[in-house]
Amino acid sequence: MAKIDDIYDAVDDFGLITSTEAREIGVSNAELVQLARRGKLRRVARGVYRMPVWPYQEAAPYAIAVKSVGADAYLYGESVVALLRLAPIDPARMWIASSGRVRRRLGEGTLVMERQPKTQIAHYEGVPSQPVADAIRAAAETMGASRARQAVEEASRLGYLTPSERDRLVEELGA
């Protein structure tokens, strides 16, 4: 079996693979670079490659941002609200949380928050994320109370929050 076939079998839902994941299936960094030069892969971030034959998905930029930060990273705060379209948010900024220090350059729009390792990670549209209730709490500081209330109502309507979670959030946000 060719290396590109191994990679095709190993990519995630967004057609992404990291150099660490590629090493685990026996593909070296040099081989990834060669495959990218030949057009079989596209480098989308440092150590993150995407299969160009993969169909575009709206959540792909979020998945790329999370993968580029590291294995323990997850979408945080406003970015979870934006991914799920719970309230109008500036999607140009990606909030990513990670338990470790991130030294690599991620681009101007990616903001990394250092957090303790989370035991509870949700996956929304295939992207590791902070649970919705926690994300709205975290985002309320930067997006304002009215948008936070709008996010709570939309999340409740879409089934991301239970009625008790909704009531607790409404009380916490002072709505």
Image (cartoon, rainbow, N blue to C red):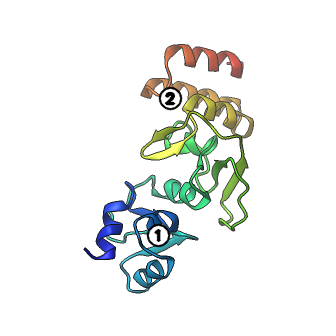
Which comes sooner in the sequence, label 1 or label 2?
A: 1
At numbered mark 1, what does the secondary structure look like: helix, strand or loop? strand
Residue 71, by quadrant, is bottom right
Residue neighbourhood size for the residue with mark 1, other residues' Cα within 10 Å, grouped as few (<14), some (14–19), many (≥20): many
The local crowd at label 2, few if under 14, some if 14 to 19, many if 20 or more residues have their Cα within 10 Å, is many
Query: For the residue marked with disc 2, what is the amino acid?
Result: Ala
The residue lying at 64 percent from left, 54 percent from top is 93
Q: Name the residue under label 2.
A: 155
Q: Position of residue 171 (x, y in %)?
A: 67, 15
The answer to whether marks 1 and 2 mark residues whose Cβ atoms lie closer than 8 Å is: no
Query: Which quadrant: the N terminus?
Result: bottom left
> Which residue bears the numbered disc 1?
49
Location of residue 99 with respect to 165 vertically, above or below: below
Classify residue 82 by image quadrant.
top right
Q: Which mark is residue 166?
A: none
The location of residue 96, given as percent across then percent down, is 63, 50
- For the C terminus, give its image quadrant: top right
**Position of residue 119 measured from the top left corner of the image (x, y, whole percent):** 59, 34
Residue type highlighted by circle 1: Tyr
Find numbered disc 2 in the image and state the secondary structure of the residue it sits on: helix
Nearer mark to the viewer, of 1 and 2: 1
Residue at 62 percent of width and 26 percent of height = 149
Q: How far apart are marks 1 and 2 (CA)?
A: 32 Å
Q: Seen in the image, is 29 located left or right of residue 169?
A: left
Of all residues shown, which one is farthest toward the left?
Answer: 1
- Identify which residue is drawn at 55% across, 69% down: 47
